[in-house]
Image (spheres, rainbow, N blue to C red):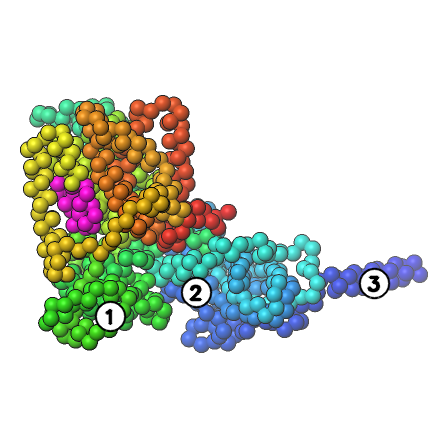
């Protein structure tokens, strides 16, 4: 009887325990699955019904199959690049409260070695709300359930349920039997609850979602790997040649390289080791510049490896001009813009793909010309002039409103590669990346030319590379970094007493943007001040050539020699905004430049040889500052102080020149400002397309 009583007691306890579990764990298993085709059984054409893959997913990145009779969705990444791919569907949740999401998942890594280095592949379930997002991840080699609970606060809220993977190397994630149910009450203790209420919408803004769409359009092919690109045999050889060349150039600044035994001295001098360290440093800046042009970071989504591509603003319009010069050999752009509106590649991959999906028409930055009457219609950037004289006809064509110098230079640089239309954009991006890096090299060499030691010159190059918007503009399709290279080369030529080369460099900058004619004028005035009469005459004669070119171009385009579309009205507020505007002020993005300005201001009255570098920079810088304070354009409607980017190499050298003579406290303050510049420059470069005309601290929003 005792045994029977014990058995009955156990049975009663089990019954009570079962009842408790039923009370504690809501009975959602038998509830209706809110996901359509959650078992993935229906579908056609390789895609399960009611599910859609992430836009821009490459072929081979997903597969719907029936492995051993069980419908399965496979998401894969083929090479080592950080890319999130999701298969998702939208669900409207009728009632607020808790919901239960379940799937059976397993993951595979390409190899044990890659998993050890990069981390294992993780299956991911992502939930998007209108103003929030949450992700659950799990990694397991065998099929296992993946469960999560999340809570919504509003009725009839539409969410996106997606299944995908997160991987830094090649890997695959498998999904089957997905369920979504509403539960009554709260989740069981110890279950996985997604704290979606803690995720702020500020980093899932419309601009960032637009940037996500742009990233997906510009993704690199799955078979491409950054690591394999770097370790390519030809790249290794080329970097080795660059390394030796930079070592030799730096060594020459510290040693007498005259005579026939120069090479013997080079290979026997122990000082070569120091120059080799400098060369390694400069090659590392090349690696960093190259990576910035290929990697983009979106908060909440991760890192993406992308092809070099134009983003927004004037960038696609420069591409249209370059394509016209390469393939039509002229600047009549009407057919090129027509091609872009039909989804052609001439305006870049983003403009092309969005147009193919009926999204955005690229506004025409053109002037309409009637070749019969010779009349020009201005102000046609958005729409054609409504007059019948400028209606589409064989006698009417369109020319660009932008100066032709920069597109002509890029077309000449790209032409030897013989690109097809779809290859022009990445090829131009590669050239612009190299141009930005050469600006860093030139900054270092100018420092050495004027007598700075290796450490000070490396500091100037480092500030330009990692503590200023120069890094972000190494991935842009604007002319500023190219103009900056011309200006730093002009400065090098002038301090090296090569006035003709200095004038040619200043002329190149002016042809790309007429406003930089101030640099050539400043060079000329400075040579006159120093009574270098022969050099001043040479500069004046050389600068006359681009002046004639600009006058002739204006007459051809506008039937006037001088075209002043701006109405200067100098205001102190505009000058202040140029320096400290929250979205584009120079002193917020590169605050250390204040020391460069001060060094130039102190050096300007002096005629001593020691102050020649800062004195040479002073007049063009302050003339440019006054002009920016007069036209009311601010510092550049783009990312940060675009119009100042070309002068950043000068300001880096001026700041270092000031620090060489500064006291302890000034150097400490400058170091703090440089660190602030680094904190803005690096995330700003990785998020460049998302930050057009955004406050400086937006580079960090969403990263915590």
Task: Give the x, y percent position of residue 421.
Answer: 22, 63
Q: Is residue 640 above or below residue 108?
A: above
Q: Is residue 243 magenta?
A: no
Q: What is the magenta range?
A: 503-520
Is mark 1 in CB contact (under 8 Å) with mark 3?
no
Task: Tell me if 617 is positioned left or right of 533 in this view.
Answer: right
The 10 Å Cα crowd at callout 3, few under 14, some 14 to 19, many 20 or more, is few
Disc 3 secondary structure class: helix
- Please give the residue where the numbered disc 2 appears in the rendered image: 54
- The residue indicated by pointer 3 is 11
Nearer-N-terminus badge (3/2): 3
What secondary structure is found at the residue carrying circle 1? loop
Residue pictured at 19% horizontal, 72% vertical: 390
Viewer-nearest of discs 1 and 3: 1
Packing grade of label 1 (10 A; few <14, some 14-19, many >=20) is: some
Residue on which disc 1 sits: 384
Task: Please name the residue shown 10% across and 25% down the image.
Answer: 258
């Amino acid at each position: 009887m005792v045994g029977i009583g014990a058995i009955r007691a156990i049975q009663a306890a089990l019954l009570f325990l079962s009842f408790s579990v039923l009370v504690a764990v809501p009975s959602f298993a038998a509830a209706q699955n809110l996901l359509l085709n959650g078992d993935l059984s229906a579908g056609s054409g390789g895609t399960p019904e009611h599910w859609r893959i992430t836009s821009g997913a490459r072929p081979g990145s997903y597969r719907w199959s029936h492995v051993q009779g069980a419908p399965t969705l496979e998401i894969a990444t083929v090479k080592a690049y950080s890319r999130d791919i999701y298969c998702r569907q939208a669900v409207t949740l009728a009632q607020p409260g808790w919901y239960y999401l379940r799937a059976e998942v397993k993951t595979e890594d390409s190899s044990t070695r890659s998993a050890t280095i990069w981390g294992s592949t993780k299956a991911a379930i992502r939930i998007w709300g209108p103003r929030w997002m949450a992700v659950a991840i799990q990694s397991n080699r065998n099929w296992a359930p993946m469960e999560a609970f999340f809570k919504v606060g509003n009725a009839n809220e539409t969410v996106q349920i997606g299944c995908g993977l997160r991987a830094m190397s090649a890997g695959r994630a498998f999904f089957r039997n997905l369920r979504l149910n509403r539960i009554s009450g709260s989740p069981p203790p110890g279950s996985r609850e997604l704290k979606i209420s803690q995720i702020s919408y500020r980093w899932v803004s419309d601009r960032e979602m637009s940037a996500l769409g742009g990233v997906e359009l510009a993704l690199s092919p799955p078979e491409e790997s950054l690591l394999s690109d770097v370790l390519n045999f030809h790249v290794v050889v080329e970097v080795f040649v660059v390394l030796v060349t930079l070592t030799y150039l730096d060594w020459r600044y510290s040693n007498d390289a005259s005579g026939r035994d120069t090479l013997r001295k080079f290979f026997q001098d122990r000082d070569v080791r120091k120059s080799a360290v400098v060369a390694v440093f400069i090659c590392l800046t090349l690696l960093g510049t190259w990576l910035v042009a290929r990697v983009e970071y979106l908060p909440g989504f991760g890192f993406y490896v992308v092809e070099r591509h134009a983003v927004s603003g004037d960038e696609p319009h420069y591409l249209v001009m370059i394509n016209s010069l390469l393939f039509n050999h002229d600047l009549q752009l009407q057919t090129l813009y027509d091609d872009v509106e039909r989804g052609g590649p001439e305006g870049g991959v983003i403009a092309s793909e969005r147009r193919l999906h009926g999204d955005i028409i690229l506004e025409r930055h053109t002037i309409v010309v009637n070749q019969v009457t010779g009349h020009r219609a201005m102000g046609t950037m958005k729409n054609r002039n409504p007059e019948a004289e400028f209606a589409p006809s064989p006698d009417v064509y369109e020319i660009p409103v932008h100066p032709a110098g920069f597109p002509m230079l890029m077309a000449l640089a790209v032409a030897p590669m013989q690109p097809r239309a779809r290859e022009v954009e990445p090829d131009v991006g590669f050239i612009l990346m190299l141009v930005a890096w050469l600006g860093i090299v030139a900054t270092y060499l100018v420092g050495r030319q004027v007598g700075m030691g290796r450490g000070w010159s490396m500091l100037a190059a480092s500030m330009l590379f990692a503590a200023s918007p120069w890094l972000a503009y190494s991935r842009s399709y604007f002319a500023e970094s190219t103009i900056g290279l011309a200006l730093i080369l002009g400065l090098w030529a002038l301090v090296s007493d090569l006035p003709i080369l200095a004038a040619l460099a200043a002329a190149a900058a002016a042809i790309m943007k007429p406003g930089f004619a101030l640099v050539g004028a400043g060079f000329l005035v400075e040579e006159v001040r120093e009574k270098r009469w022969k050099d001043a005459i040479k500069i004046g004669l050389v600068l006359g050539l681009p002046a004639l070119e600009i006058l002739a171009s204006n007459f051809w385009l506008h039937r006037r020699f001088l075209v002043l579309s701006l109405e200067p009205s100098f205001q102190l507020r505009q000058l202040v905004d140029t320096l400290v505007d929250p979205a584009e002020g120079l002193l917020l993005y590169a605050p250390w430049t204040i020391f460069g300005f001060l060094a130039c201001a102190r050096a300007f009255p002096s005629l001593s040889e020691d102050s020649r570098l800062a004195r040479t920079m002073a007049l063009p810088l302050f003339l440019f500052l006054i002009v920016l304070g007069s036209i009311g354009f601010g510092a550049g409607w783009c990312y940060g102080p675009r119009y100042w980017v070309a002068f950043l190499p000068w300001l880096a050298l001026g700041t270092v020149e000031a620090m060489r003579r500064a006291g302890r406290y000034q150097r400490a303050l400058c170091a703090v400002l440089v660190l602030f510049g680094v904190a803005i420059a690096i995330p700003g470069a990785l998020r460049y397309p998302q930050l057009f005309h955004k406050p400086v601290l937006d580079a960090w929003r969403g990263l915590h």
